[in-house]
Amino acid sequence: MDTSSIPSKTNVEDDKEINTESDESRALQDLCDVNGITKEMCSTVESLDMFMGAVKDLTSTRHFPNLTSLCIMKQLHLKEIIGLDKCPKLNSLWLTECPLERVSGLERCISLKSLYLSGNHFSKIGGGLSTLTNLTTLWVNENKLTELKGLEVLVSLKVLWACGNSIDIIGDIFQYNTQLEEINLSSNQISSLRDVLHLSLLPKLKKLSFRDPHFGANPLCHLCNYQTYMIHHLPNLTILDAESIGEESKQLVKAIYTKKKMYYNMRCKTLKRDASNVVSKAEELLRIASLPMHAKAKLFARAIKDIGAVSSHLSLQEQNNSNNNSSSSSSSSSSSGNGNDSPTGILIGNLTSSTTDQQTSSIQVNTNFETDNDDKSSSSLPLMKECSQLLLDVQNAHNEVNTCMSHMSNEVQDLVKNVINEVSELSTSRVMLEFDTGGNVRLEEGKPSDSWHQNCCDLVRSRFTASDYHKSTSSNSSNSSSSSNGNNILDVSSIHVTRVVRVHNRYLRWRFDKVVKKSQTAQEALLHPTSETNGGGTSNNPVGTPTR
């Protein structure tokens, strides 16, 4: 077999290099022809243009070391930026309407000040601009961007256009771009006026556009008080949405915003005053409700005091009786020697002194009476002690009840205050939400008399199925195992709606209307597929009959 006819690997690589060089030479020749120059002039050329070609890369630009401006448009095969590393003096670069899929290859272009990347296919910027610290103008219109991350290093950026993308939030992406003077974000998906507050951190911002005649508008442009909100929070603006802002307009906006602020502050103060009145009324009702209880407590305390007084009196009387009995017993023992000095002897002398039998009988009667008194005092003494202890226990219990009543009253008052204050703060936050959103978001508390309140309740009840929450027979058999695992099944038989709040959101309403309109347009297109397919003529098919 003759191996001389088989190409070697070295020959294949040489052929590829030759083809590459021939392609680059051809591209260079085309570039020179388009710009009306010769190859000998490449080292002195500063500006080049390339329109509607089939260029796959930019390696031919390495022959232009003094290039400062390059404009490339509609190169349908240019998907990546390759070959600009030999152009360190490049100052302005246009790469528009090309299928670029990512931003890269610009690391060596540190002198770049203007970059136009409109009409490409990349979805993020990333770190492709990390070395372009001198960049002052950036256009990234009509790409597939959903965010603007990657601009942090562009500290010298003054002009930014990012129209026709899918950016839905601004956030703090411009916190490092404090030199920005012009921003155009038309035809994106920005819907919240609160994003405008982040732009107030840009002290040099003069021109701002969320709505452009060429690109279109953002959803926030359809919100209420849009221009008033923008001019108030960005007082340094001179042009908004391609319209100049005069001093008269700023003064008018200031007056309108002051009136709105006064109105919402008045509403907040009214809510707080109403809450304070409700708290005072609740405290008064609690006080009135506790009056009978306090009156009965006072009666009970007085009864305890009276019982204590009677008990003290009886104890004192018992003590006196016991003292008298002890003195009587001592005197009776001494009366055996001299009967005239004792009370018994006086009593006997008063009755009669005729015979000794009468004296003996009198002494027996008095002795029996003294014995009975001693027995009574000795038997009632434990009872009195028991009554005193019982009275002390009742008094302690009464004090504890009073303490508990006082604590309970304070807890009820605190609970009522907390509930009322929470409701007041919730209502105030709703009012401030309406103020902060320019009146585009509003919350409305529903009443049973409102038709939509009843509709919402019916809707919730219609979605509730009791069988989904009932315990089945199989679950009853394994109740112990499920409860041990902590998976207790709720036995709910019905649902009750206690509160309905309606949200008025103008942006969501705008989206809803847009979808409805789009659906109606599509339905009409299905019902009337006429002029578009027949070149503006009428269709022979009856209405409602689809065409093939």
Image (tube, grey):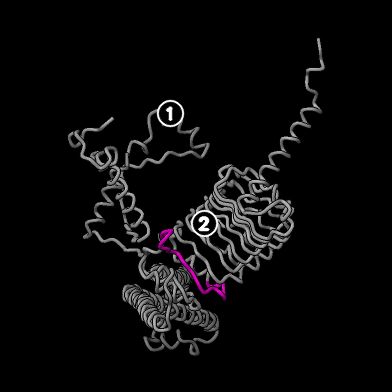
The stretch in magenta equals 200-218
Inter-mark Cα distance, 2 to 1 = 66 Å
Residue type highlighted by circle 2: Asn
Q: Is residue 393 above or below residue 548?
A: below
Residue type highlighted by circle 1: Ser
Q: Is residue 107 above or below residue 379?
A: above
User: In this figure, which residue is indicated by the disc labeled 1?
Assistant: 477
- Please say whether residue 18 is visible from this viewpoint: yes
Viewer-nearest of discs 2 and 1: 2
User: In this figure, which residue is indicated by the disc labeled 2?
Assistant: 141
- In magenta segment, residue 205: yes
Q: Is residue 115 above or below residue 472?
A: below
Disc 2 crowd rating (10 Å Cα; few below 14, some 14-19, many 20+) is many
Residue sitting at x 36%, y 63%: 222
Main SS of the magenta part reads: loop
Q: Give 185 or 286, whichever is nearer the viewer.
A: 185
Q: Give 427 or 471, whichever is nearer the viewer.
A: 427
Label 2 vs 1, first from the N-terminus:
2
